[in-house]
Amino acid sequence: MAGRHTAPSDGDDRDDRALLGSVVRFLVAVLLLCAIVLGSFLIAPQFVDDVEIGDVEIDSRSNPSSEPPPAGERNPDVTDPADPGVSTYDTDVETVSSDTVEDFVHAEVNDRRAEHGLDPLEWDGTVASVSRAHSGDMADREYFSHTNPDGEGPYDRFTAVDDYCQGYGENIALTWLDRPVERPGDEDDVTEYETAEAVATGLVDQWMNSTDHRAAILEEHDSYGWDRAGVGVYVADDGAVYASQNFCHEW
């Protein structure tokens, strides 16, 4: 007896086509997902390594400050009564502490002196206290000058606290944390300080790019050479960083 062949019904055809369509859509979805994931791996590093915001280029891989070399005695027998002590400011990278900035500035200045064959300056805690008081006073009374509103200059402020420096000099600087600032030595470029180490380098760069301040650091003047110095930094609530470095030649 011959066998009978039964042709598929229209319903079976529709089921097969629906199943095939589902498989195709699934494969397309998988391929699309793979393309998105692969594209993310290829593109993402360009944005992670280097983010550009306006005219400011910010390295998103900013590292916290390294450990600074201790400058010297922090609790001298004689201090300025107006010394504000340690001040801080929180950035997204670290808490910037004024005493850490002072350590970095002192070390950086001695490095610059060494590059020019000069001996390192000894840290003087009393001189640093007078410097710190002046930085705090500039922030509190909103001025930026070697002479304060009372008419007192650097040597006046020091002799009011102690009197053992035959020669005396002062460098001052002002910059900001968490704010675009002009890069010292390059008026066409800006930077943004987020760490104690970075802002300290920026402060010293300011001085080294100024004829008079550079002369004080490298003793390119007619007065006494220095044998000691102290750095006083005050960090204001708005991120302003006031810095004073005073130089001394003992009797």
Image (cartoon, rainbow, N blue to C red):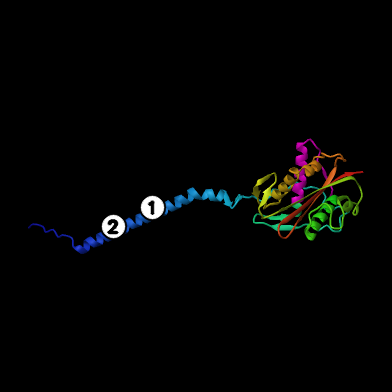
Q: Is residue 107 magenta?
A: yes
The x and y percentages for residue 231 are 80, 49
Q: Earlier in the sequence, mark 1 or mark 2?
A: 2
Q: Nearer the viewer, residue 159 or 9?
A: 159
Q: Is residue 78 above or below residue 15?
A: above
The x and y percentages for residue 140 are 79, 60
Residue to which mark 1 is pinned? 31
Residue to which mark 2 is pinned? 20
On screen, residue 206 versus residue 122, left or right, reads left
Q: The N terminus appears in which quarter of the rendering?
A: bottom left
Q: Residue at x 75, y 40 (%)?
A: 112
User: What are the residue bounds of the magenta stretch?
Assistant: 101-124
Q: For the view shown, which residue lies furthest in the top direction?
A: 117
Q: Residue at x 78, y 46 (%)?
A: 106
Q: Residue at x 38, y 52 (%)?
A: 31
- Find numbered disc 2 in the image and state the secondary structure of the residue it sits on: helix
Real-space Cα distance between discs 1 and 2?
Answer: 17 Å
The x and y percentages for residue 142 are 78, 59
